[in-house]
Amino acid sequence: MARTTKVTPKGSAVYARIRQILESARASAARSVNTTQVVANWLIGREIVEEEQKGTHKAGYGEHLLAQLSARLVGEYGQGYSATNLRWFRQFFLCYPVLAGPQFITH
């Protein structure tokens, strides 16, 4: 017995429901990725601040630290980890020392 395939028209109700599921899943994934990246940036800022506070020459040491970190991170993870961005991550942590509760904060 030959198998026949029924083509579902683009405008059908089942197509619309499946499309809605996929669009919702994509939007949810994008929000999740964005939230995760924000938390990662905050945690990076916290690490930088904590490391800088251990040094006796904060300003000079901080710039040297950022340059070293940036060189290594850009090589492995790309331009999103430039010294400028690392400064922004540090500032982000300093402006928001508590980020949305303990579920996001790991150490």
Image (cartoon, grey):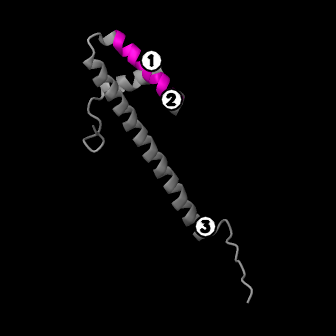
Q: Amino acid at mark 2?
A: Gly
Q: Nearer the viewer, residue 87 or 75?
A: 75
> Percent position (x, y) of residue 28?
46, 51
> Percent position (x, y) of residue 89?
39, 26
Q: CA distance from mark 2 to mark 3?
A: 39 Å
* Label at residue 80: 2
Residue 74 against residue 19 in the figure, above or below: above
Q: CA distance from mark 3 to mark 1?
A: 52 Å
Q: Amino acid at mark 1?
A: Ala
Residue 57 against residue 95 in the figure, above or below: above
- Taking the spot 67% from the left edge, 72% from the top edge, the residue there is 8
Q: Which residue is mark 3?
A: 15
> Percent position (x, y) of residue 82?
49, 23
Label whose residue precedes the other's in the sequence (2 or 3) = 3
Q: Nearer the viewer, residue 65 or 38?
A: 65
Say which element carries label 1: helix
Label whose residue precedes the other's in the sequence (2 or 1) = 1
Say which element carries label 3: helix
Viewer can see residue 45: yes
- Taking the spot 51% from the left edge, 32% from the top edge, the residue there is 76
Q: Which residues are magenta?
A: 60-75
Image quarter where the C terminus lies is top left
Q: CA distance from mark 2 to mark 1?
A: 14 Å
Which label sits in the foreground, 3 or 1? 1
Q: Which residue is mark 1?
A: 67
Viewer can see residue 81: no
